[in-house]
Image: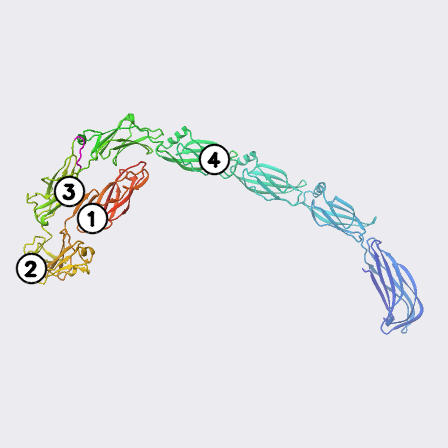
Amino acid sequence: MALNHSGNTDFGGGHYGLNLIWSASQSISGNYSDITATLQISAYGGYSIVANATKYGHITIDGQQFDFSAVVGTLKASNSPKTLATATKRVYHNADGSKYLYASASFALNATLSGSWVGTISTAADYSIDTIPRASSISTPNFTVGDNVTVSISRASSSFTHSIQLDVGGVAIKTASGVGASHTWTFTEADVKRIYAAMGSATSGAVVLWCNTYSGSTLVGDAKGTATCYQVGNSTLQTAPTFVVGDSRTYAVNRLRGSVTHTLQLYAGSTLVRTATGVGASYTVDLTAAEIAKVYALGTSVAMKMVCTAYHYGRNIGTSQQTGTASAPPVSSITSKPDHTIGGGYTVSISRSRNAVSHTLRLYVAGKQIKEIGGVATSYAWTPTATEIAAEYAATPNSNTAAAQATIWCYHYGKLIGTATASGTATVNPTAAAPVFAGYSFADIRPETVALTGDDQILVAGESTLKVTIPAAQAASSTTSATIKQYILYCGGATASAAYSASDVAIQLAGASSGSIRVAAVDSRGNQTVVERLASLVAYTPPRVTQMQLRRDNNVDNKTKLAVKGVWWPGNFGASDNSLASTYQYKATSAEQYTDGGAVSIAITGGEWAFEGYLPGDLGAGGFDFQKSFSVMLSATDALNTATSVGIIDRGIPTMHLDKGGVGIGKIRASGALDVAGVIITEGSEVYHPGNKPTTEQLGAMPSSAKVELLDETRSYNLDDYWMPGQTILVRQSVAASGKVANCPSKSAGIVHVEGSSILIMQAYIETAGGAIYSRYRAIGGSTTEWVGPSGIQSGSNSNGSWTKWPDGTMASYGVVTSQSVPAHSTIGITGQSILFPVGFLAPPSMTITVLADTVGEFSAKLGGVNATLWWGSVTNNSDYARVTPVHWHAIGRWK
């Protein structure tokens, strides 16, 4: 198809041509084309036409012939083509705008060209003219039911108007007229419902658009378009039904169109709890008490389901759902402890997560319920009644403390959601719950002390036997549900006890040492009521031997001197004075029985006594056989007690005896420079036996060059350098104490004497102050023995304690001190000050202290510190009452 076309016919051997050319201008509104056709003649190459005569022809357009006449004249290629004629005709198109054009022409040339005759020439230019648009086209995209629909119309002329109609499933839904290039339809609820009715149960429908095109009032044509409409997509429930029962919960729904509404159904398990209709994009649920009851009927943690059904103008377009869990609120907690003193009450503080939670509070002591309170919110202040106080005491009859417990039962809309407990301690006030105890009577029941005092209400310290009687009429009792267990008698740091009885109870305590008599009634909780009575006290102390020493004259003679000292109490008991006498007994240490030695004439000065003099022995006034050792027991007796002390008299045979002539070993020297009694051994070999006397050459003699040397502080020494027989070395006190003398057996001043022979040499060290003798030996060409010290052991005592000294420098010291009153459950110093040793040590000793209480499990002692002269420490009392207690101490160290 075209709006112009041509047709050509060559003639004259192809050297000439006749060409018909036409063009069309169209009227869309008139549905016609105006055709202009032109007939031309041409010469090609070097050919020409000379025809000056008038020639005739015609042009035919769409069946109409147009005649013409023309003169060709001279026609050459250079001036070709030559127009012969033009014709114009209006050609109407078919109703659909199509048209096939028939165009032809003929020309009677009637001339001879290049020797050939050419008559009439014909040509044609038939062709289809471009179709003139007629009816407009209509279209719209697919759409969702309920949405606005805009149709687009493609029209051939802007003057065209249209009548349009929208059908769904063959049902006319919307129409419009006078429409130009587009139109938008909006749909009413009725429109939507008609569409859904036309769709049936399908989720989409076939849409047909009808379009009639008008030019003015003339119908140009009609057309149709198609599309698909779709049901609105289903909504999606966004929120899961997971919530705390009673809390507000908002559910969000994602819907595709605002015209979509929903029905929400909330289920607890399979039980429908709530239905909500007409819901848009969100819905908030606040459950009613009845609805909460439906949830709690299934438990405190319930599987929930929310079903969302979507509707579009009444049409069910689908469902969605979410699942979750409905849980009870967290169980409340108790933020306070039920610690309290019985009778005082306390406040229970509660932390709850929701105001709708209420509580039933139960209070317990030792597992027994004391009180129940309902409807508690966040706190409860308990002030116990007398009945409740009595119930608390009854719950703990055997202890001053008991487990206290506060428990809450948590309810939410009547549903028990859990319990919580707080634990603490219920404490009995020992003062408020102490036993009721009136009194008792007492007496000294020891005949000896009563005879001395003349009154059983007077006590002799440490000697009287105290008897306390609690009459049945004055028996202790408890007003707080405890039972009376025992009575304890306290006197001077000592205790005695007796079990409780409804009858008369008597307690005896020997050696009562205080005028303060305290009797405690002790109940099953350990609480005490103490009643004190004051008795007259005789401040008696037993006699003691504080120092005793036995010594032979010259350490070897028969005559033996006793030096003894002691203390006693020289007072009046009330009915008589105290008196003191002393006697002694003796025996050989190997004997079993002592022999009475007679009275000792002690000298008494106030509270001290002493004696120093020779004792008659197995030799009578001559003393004690020097070849034996003896045990002497001295006694000092007053009105109530006897103090004894035992001493040892060593044999008179010395380990070593020195005189001007020489040394005796194991005997008094009789002859010779070295007089030995017994076998001489060195390095395991016998070098001398009494039955095999050595020769003169073996014994040798003391050289005339023997000398005396004084050791001073100018330098250091070593006694291993002094083995020349006959040497005498003088050691000053300052030198001995300074440690400048190596291998010296003593820190005291002394004389070293060296004696010996070619076989054996001896060193003797004699202390100048005490006379103690040390000795050691060296065999010629052999080793040196250890120093052997004196055999005497010293001991004694004073008000600070007792001690024992050994010759090697070891000293043990010991004693007992009585603590000050230690309060219950407390720690204090033993006496409140440092405690002196009876004799000082050379350096701080090793020391232990031990409590001697009758209930050691509740008492302990701890050493605080110690130096060479004193020590200090503390006592801990874990019992429920104040006490004084004796503490034994023991120390071991060096005295030299």
Tell me, yes or no, whether the two marked residues, 2 and 4, touch with CB atoms within 8 Å: no
**Looking at this view, is 124 or 178 the one in front?**
178
Q: Are marks 4 and 3 in contact (CB under 8 Å)?
A: no
Residue underneath mark 4 = 379
Q: Which mark is residue 694?
A: 2
Residue interval drawn in magenta: 569-575
Q: Say if the magenta span includes residue 571.
A: yes
Q: Amino acid at mark 2?
A: Pro
- Whether the magenta-drawn stretch holds residue 494 is answered as no
Picture coordinates of residue 625, whole percent (x, y): 7, 46
* Vertical arrangement, residue 883 with respect to residue 218, above or below: above
Q: Main secondary structure of the magenta part?
A: loop
Depth order, front residue of 459/487: 459
Q: Secondary structure at mark 3?
A: strand
Which of marks 2 and 3 precedes in the sequence? 3
Which of these two is toward me, 644 or 459?
459
Q: Could you say which disc has been placed on residue 565 in the image? A: 3
Q: Earlier in the sequence, mark 4 or mark 3?
A: 4
How far apart marks 4 and 3 lie (CA) works out to: 78 Å
Q: Is residue 226 left or right of residue 657?
A: right
Q: Is residue 670 left or right of residue 325?
A: left
